[in-house]
RNA sequence: GCCCGAGUGGCGAAAUGGUAGACGCAGGGGAUUCAAAAUCCCCCGGUAGCAAUACCGUGUCGGUUCGAGUCCGACCUCGGGCACCA
C-alpha cells in the first residue's frame, strides 16, 4: 500500500543535508565506470574470487527477486574486491527458449527481435541498481558466437562417446510440441506448459549422464559448501539402490528370466513373476497369443500420460509360462505381464512377493495368486491378510526357514546376507542401480541451438565441419521472415535451410532440425564467462585461473536440473580438453536464496470469481484493507509469491525512482535471512529510506572541528572496532541481515556519541566502508564528504584494532538455580576465587541463601555465575 | 507411502549449552510546530504490583545438565523433495 509518499527526490531548502538518490546514484555510477572499477583482471599476484548469480531469462522486465539475488552477489563481489581479491562478477542472458517463440506466435514478430529487445530493456533496468558487474563480458546464449562454441562442444562430446542417438519412448509435451527430459516432467505435466505429458517413441540425441551416476553421487560428499538439502535432493534424484539380479529357470527350457530385486531376503515369499509389457519374453509370447498381444497393446495405449499411469489400475495377464523357484525348485511360479512393471528400470522383470509388498499383494488378491510370508514379526506368527508386512529395515524380524540360515535379524541384515548367499551359490549377481536416466537433449523447436549434424544417405550421421560453424538459425524463409503462425518446428518447414551437402562426401544430405534443450546453454556459461570472446569454447588458461565459481547464488528450483547438468557438463568438458581436471565440480560454494513475496489483495465479482487488486489500488481504513475506489473490503493473503496474474509484483524501476537503488538493495537484504523469503512492504521501504537519509544527515552535520570527551572517543572507537568484526562475520557467513543489524547499531552509537568531530568522522568513514557493499552510492557520498581518499569502492576493507576489542571489565549474570537473579561487573581477568567471593557478597544471593552455604558454586569466567542451593 | 527442513512478541527476526527477544517494522506516550510533515526523546512478551520485584514464557509432552530456544526421545502442525524404482 502506498500511504503517504515520501518524496526523497523533491527539491527542498535543506537540500545540502538531504539525501537525493536521483542525483548521487548516477554520479557515482559514472565515477565507477570512469575508473573501470569492475573489470575482472587476471592477476596471478592476487587471490581470485569468482562470484556468480544464476543468469536471468530475458522475459522483458526485471523483478524485485532479481534485485535481491544480484544484490547478494554484489555484496560478496564488492566485499571480496575490498579484501584484495581479483573478482570476476559477470552477467549474461539465458536467451533461448519457448517464451520467445510463443511471443512470436502471438504477435507475429521474430523470437530474435523479441529476445534482444528484452535484453536491452532489462539491462537498462539493471544498470541503475549499481551492481559491480563486468559488463564487458556480457553475452546471450542466443548469440551465434556463443552457440557456435556450444556446437563445437557437442561435436567433441559426440566424438568422445558422451552423446549418442537412440529411439526412445519420450515425454511429449502436446502444447509446446516438444520432448521433455524426465527432470522437466512435474506431476506428469510439462514444467513450462503444464500440459499432461504423453509418451511417444522418437529418435533422439542423449547425453550419457547415467554413466556418471556413481561419480556424480560420490562427489556430492566433497561439496562441503553446498546446502545439505541440495546435496540430498541430488542424491535422491540419482537414486542409487543395491540389489541383485537373479535368474529364474524356465520349465519349458527357454532362456532364464532375470529379475532385479532389492529384497532378495523375501525370496521365500516369491509367488509369481511379473514382466513389463515391453519385455522381450512377453513380446515373443504375444506373437502366438492374440489375447496377450491385445493386452500389451492396451497397456501401451493406456500409458499415454504419466498422470494417468499414476492412477491406473494394476492389471496383468498370465502368459502361460512357469519358472522354478531358485531356492525351492519344487515350486513352480507362474509368469505374468503386469502393466505396472517398468522396462527402463532394472531388467523389466520382477518377482512378486505379495506378503511384503503392498502393490504385489493387491495384484495377488485381484488375480487369486498365492500369498506366502518370508518372515513374521518376532512373537507374532500371523500370516499377511490385507496389509503387506513391510517393517523399517532396521527393525528385527523373524525369517521363516531362511535359505541363507538367517533367523531373527533386521531386514537390512537379511538383505545383505541374501545377496551374499545368492552370489555364493552362483544364482545371482549383486547390482548397483540408479534412477538417473540419460539426458535427452533434442527439442523440436526453432529458438534453440541447432544440433550440428547432417544425415547423409551414404555416410550416415555426420558432424558438421568445424569451419562451417555455427550452424546458424535461419532468419528468413525464402523472402519472408520465418513463420511461427502454425505450431511445430519452423526449421522442419523451411524450404532450403535443411538441405546441405554432406560434410564428408559432399553428396546431398539434410540437417538435423531439432535444437538443443536450453539447459545445455546454461550448463557451461559459467566457464564461458572466463574467456567470453575466445575462438574456442574456453581458453583453458583463463578457465584455470578463474574457475571454479567460488560463490554461486540462485534459486532452490534449480537444485536438480541445472546444477546436476552443469556438474555433468564440467566433467564432459574436462574429458574433451576444454576444462582442467580441477574444474569438474564447477561450483565451490552454493547459496540458494529465498523469494521476495508480497501480500495479495483479493475481492470477488458478482459471479464469485476472484478479482485481484494492485497495491497502489488499495488503502487501509479502520484496520481493514479496502479498494480505494469502491471501498470494498479485501481479503489479504500475506507473503505470497509474486505473480502478474495476482497483481502483487513490485517493479524495481518504480522503487528506484521513488527511493533510489540503495534503498531497494538495503531493504531486500535486511530483516530476513537470505535463504528465507522476505516480504516486500512499502512501509519497510520507506523506513529504509528514512534510515539512509539519517545516515546521510549524520555525515553532513558532523562538525570535524567539534571537541569531545576522550572517554567518548574511546567508546566510539571500541564500538566501531566491534562493528567491523561483526559486519565482516555476517558477510562471510551469508548472514547479511545480522550485518545490517550491526550497521544500525553502529549508526545509533555514532549519533548518540559525544565524541569529538575527528573521532566521529573516523567512525563515519568506517561506517561508509562497511555499508559500501550494501549501499554503494550513499557510501561514496559519505566517504567523499568526510575526506576519504579516492573511491570507497577501491578502498581496502577496514581492519579492527585488536586493542579496542578487548574490554577491561565484564558484566557477569548471576544465576540462582539457573535463574537470573542479578549481575556483577568484574575485571576481565578476575580469578575464579575473586569472583566467588564477590558473588557471596551479592545482596540477591545473600537474600536467597539466608546465611546457609550454597550446595555448589559454578563460575564460568567471562560468562556466568550459577549458585546452586 | 518414503526422505528432508522449520515452528521464538502484533510482525520480520537475533541468540559458540550460559542474561531469550539484539536490530528493524508496527504501536503507545512526549518534545518541537499555529497545525501538520519531517526530526528528536521515552515505553513496548504475558500476568500481578505505585514500585522494588515475583511468577509464567521459544509448537506439545518427557529426558540429559548446575544451566536447554539450542542436545536426546516421542508427538502435533506447516513447508519442501521423491514416488508403480521392484
Image: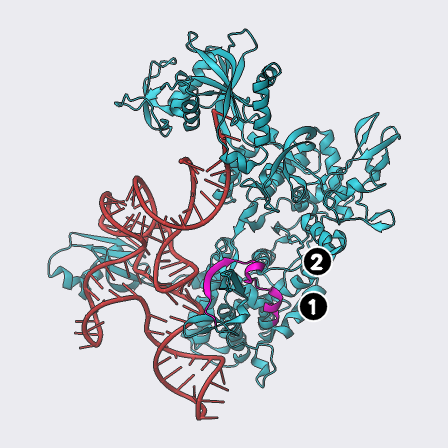
Chain colours: A cyan, B red
Q: Residue furthest right?
A: A506
From the image, state whether disc 1 or disc 2 is nearer to you.
Answer: 2
Q: Residue at x 41, y 28 (%)?
A: A358
Q: Is residue A635 magenta?
A: yes
Residue positioned 54% across, 12% down in the render? A256
**Magenta segment range?**
A632-657
- Residue at image location 62% in from the left, 41% down from the top: A566
Of A244 and B50, nearer the camera is A244
Question: Could you say which quadrant of the image residue A382 lies in?
Answer: top left
Query: Left or right: A398 with respect to A770?
Result: left
Q: Chain of mark 2?
A: A
- Give left or right: position of A489 versus B4: right
Q: Which mark is residue A792?
A: none
The reply to whether the magenta stretch includes residue A741 is: no
Picture quarter containing residue A748?
bottom left
Q: Quarter of the image containing the C terminus of chain A?
A: bottom left
Name the residue that disc number 2 marks: A118
Amino acid at each position: 500500500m502506498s500511504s503517504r509518499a515520501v518524496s526523497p527526490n523533491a527539491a527542498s531548502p535543506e537540500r545540502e543535508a538531504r539525501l537525493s538518490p536521483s542525483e548521487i546514484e548516477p554520479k557515482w555510477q559514472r565515477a565507477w565506470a570512469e575508473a573501470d572499477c569492475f573489470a575482472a583482471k587476471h592477476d596471478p599476484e592476487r587471490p581470485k574470487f569468482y562470484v556468480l548469480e544464476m543468469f536471468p531469462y530475458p522475459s522483458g522486465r526485471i523483478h524485485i527477486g532479481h534485485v535481491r539475488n544480484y544484490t547478494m552477489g554484489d555484496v560478496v563481489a564488492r566485499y571480496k574486491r575490498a579484501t584484495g581479491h581479483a573478482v570476476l562478477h559477470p552477467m549474461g542472458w539465458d536467451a533461448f527458449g519457448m517464451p520467445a517463440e510463443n511471443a512470436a506466435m502471438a504477435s507475429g514478430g521474430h523470437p530474435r527481435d523479441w529476445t534482444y529487445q528484452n535484453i536491452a530493456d532489462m539491462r537498462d533496468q539493471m544498470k541503475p541498481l549499481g551492481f559491480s558487474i563486468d559488463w564487458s563480458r556480457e553475452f546471450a546464449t542466443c548469440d551465434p558466437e556463443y552457440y557456435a562454441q556450444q556446437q563445437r562442444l557437442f561435436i567433441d562430446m559426440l566424438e568422445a562417446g558422451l552423446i549418442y542417438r537412440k529411439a526412445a519412448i519420450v515425454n511429449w509435451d502436446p502444447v509446446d510440441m516438444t520432448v521433455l527430459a524426465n527432470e522437466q516432467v512435474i506431476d506428469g505435466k510439462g514444467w513450462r506448459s503444464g500440459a499432461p505429458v504423453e509418451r511417444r517413441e522418437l529418435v533422439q540425441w542423449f547425453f550419457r549422464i547415467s554413466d556418471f551416476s556413481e561419480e556424480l553421487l560420490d562427489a556430492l560428499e566433497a561439496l562441503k559448501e553446498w546446502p545439505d538439502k541440495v546435496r540430498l535432493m541430488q542424491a535422491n534424484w540419482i537414486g542409487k539402490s543395491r540389489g541383485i539380479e537373479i535368474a529364474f529357470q524356465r520349465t519349458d527350457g527357454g532362456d532364464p528370466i532375470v529379475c532385479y530385486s532389492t529384497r532378495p531376503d523375501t525370496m521365500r515369499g516369491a509367488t509369481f513373476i511379473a514382466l513389463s509389457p515391453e519385455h522381450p519374453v512377453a513380446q515373443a509370447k504375444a506373437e502366438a497369443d492374440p489375447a496377450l498381444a491385445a493386452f500389451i497393446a492396451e497397456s501401451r495405449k493406456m500409458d499415454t500420460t504419466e498422470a494417468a499411469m499414476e492412477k491406473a489400475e494394476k492389471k496383468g495377464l498370465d502368459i502361460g509360462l512357469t519358472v522354478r523357484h531358485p531356492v525351492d525348485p519344487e515350486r513352480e511360479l507362474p509368469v505374468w505381464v503386469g502393466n505396472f512393471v517398468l522396462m527402463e528400470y532394472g531388467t523389466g522383470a520382477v518377482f512378486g512377493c505379495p506378503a511384503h509388498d503392498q502393490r504385489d499383494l493387491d495384484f495377488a488378491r485381484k488375480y487369486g495368486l498365492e500369498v506366502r510370508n518370508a518372515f513374521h514379526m518376532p512373537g507374532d506368527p500371523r500370516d499377511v491378510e490385507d496389509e503387506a508386512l513391510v517393517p523399517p529395515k532396521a527393525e528385527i524380524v523373524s525369517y521363516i526357514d531362511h535359505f541363507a540360515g538367517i533367523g531373527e535379524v533386521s531386514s537390512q541384515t537379511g538383505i545383505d546376507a541374501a545377496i551374499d548367499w545368492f552370489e555364493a551359490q552362483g544364482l545371482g549377481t549383486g547390482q548397483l542401480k540408479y534412477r538417473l536416466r540419460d539426458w535427452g537433449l533434442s527439442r523440436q523447436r526453432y529458438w534453440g541451438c541447432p544440433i550440428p549434424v547432417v544425415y547423409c544417405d551414404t555416410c550416415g550421421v555426420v558432424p558438421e565441419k568445424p569451419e562451417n560453424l555455427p550452424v546458424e538459425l535461419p532468419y528468413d524463409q525464402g523472402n519472408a521472415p520465418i513463420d511461427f503462425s502454425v505450431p511445430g518446428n519452423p526449421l522442419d518447414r523451411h524450404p532450403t535451410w535443411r538441405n546441405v551437402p554432406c560434410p564428408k562426401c559432399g553428396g546431398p544430405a539434410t540437417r538435423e532440425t531439432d535444437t538443443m534443450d536450453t539447459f545445455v546453454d546454461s550448463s557451461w556459461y559459467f566457464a564461458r564467462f572466463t574467456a567470453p570472446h575466445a575462438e574456442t569454447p574456453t581458453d583453458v588458461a583463463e578457465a584455470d585461473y578463474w574457475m571454479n565459481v567460488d560463490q554461486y547464488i540462485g534459486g532452490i528450483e534449480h537444485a536438480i536440473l541445472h546444477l546436476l547438468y552443469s556438474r555433468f557438463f564440467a566433467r564432459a568438458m574436462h574429458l574433451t580438453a576444454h576444462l582442467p581436471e580441477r574444474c569438474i565440480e564447477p561450483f565451490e560454494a552454493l547459496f540458494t536464496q529465498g523469494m521476495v513475496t508480497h501480500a495479495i489483495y483479493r475481492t470477488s465479482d458478482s459471479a464469485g470469481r476472484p478479482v485481484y487488486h494492485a497495491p497502489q489500488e488499495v488503502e487501509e481504513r479502520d484496520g481493514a484493507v479496502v479498494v480505494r475506489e469502491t471501498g470494498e473490503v479485501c481479503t489479504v493473503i500475506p507473503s505470497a509469491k509474486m505473480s502478474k496474474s495476482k497483481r502483487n509484483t513490485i517493479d524495481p524501476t518504480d522503487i528506484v525512482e521513488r527511493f533510489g537503488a540503495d534503498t531497494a538493495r538495503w531493504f531486500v537484504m535486511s530483516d530476513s535471512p537470505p535463504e528465507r523469503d522476505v516480504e516486500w512492504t512499502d512501509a519497510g521501504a520507506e523506513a529504509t529510506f528514512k534510515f539512509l537519509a539519517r545516515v546521510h544527515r549524520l555525515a553532513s552535520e558532523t562538525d570535524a572541528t567539534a571537541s569531545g570527551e576522550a572517554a567518548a572517543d574511546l567508546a566510539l572507537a571500541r564500538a566501531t572496532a566491534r562493528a567491523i568484526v561483526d559486519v565482516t562475520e555476517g558477510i562471510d557467513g551469508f548472514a547479511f541481515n545480522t550485518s545490517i543489524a550491526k550497521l544500525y547499531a553502529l549508526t545509533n552509537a555514532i549519533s548518540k556519541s559525544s565524541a569529538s568531530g575527528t573521532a566521529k568522522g573516523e567512525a563515519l568513514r568506517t561506517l561508509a566502508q562497511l555499508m559500501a557493499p550494501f549501499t554503494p552510492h550513499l557510501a561514496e557520498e559519505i566517504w567523499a564528504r568526510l575526506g576519504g581518499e579516492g573511491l570507497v569502492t577501491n578502498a581496502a576493507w577496514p581492519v579492527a584494532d585488536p586493542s579496542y576489542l578487548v574490554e577491561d571489565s565484564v558484566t557477569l549474570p548471576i544465576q540462582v538455580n539457573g535463574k537470573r537473579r542479578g549481575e556483577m561487573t568484574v575485571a576481565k581477568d578476575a580469578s575464579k576465587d575473586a569472583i566467588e567471593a564477590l558473588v557471596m557478597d551479592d545482596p540477591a544471593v545473600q537474600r536467597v541463601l539466608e546465611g546457609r552455604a550454597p550446595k555448589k558454586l559454578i563460575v564460568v569466567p567471562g560468562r556466568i555465575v550459577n549458585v546452586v542451593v
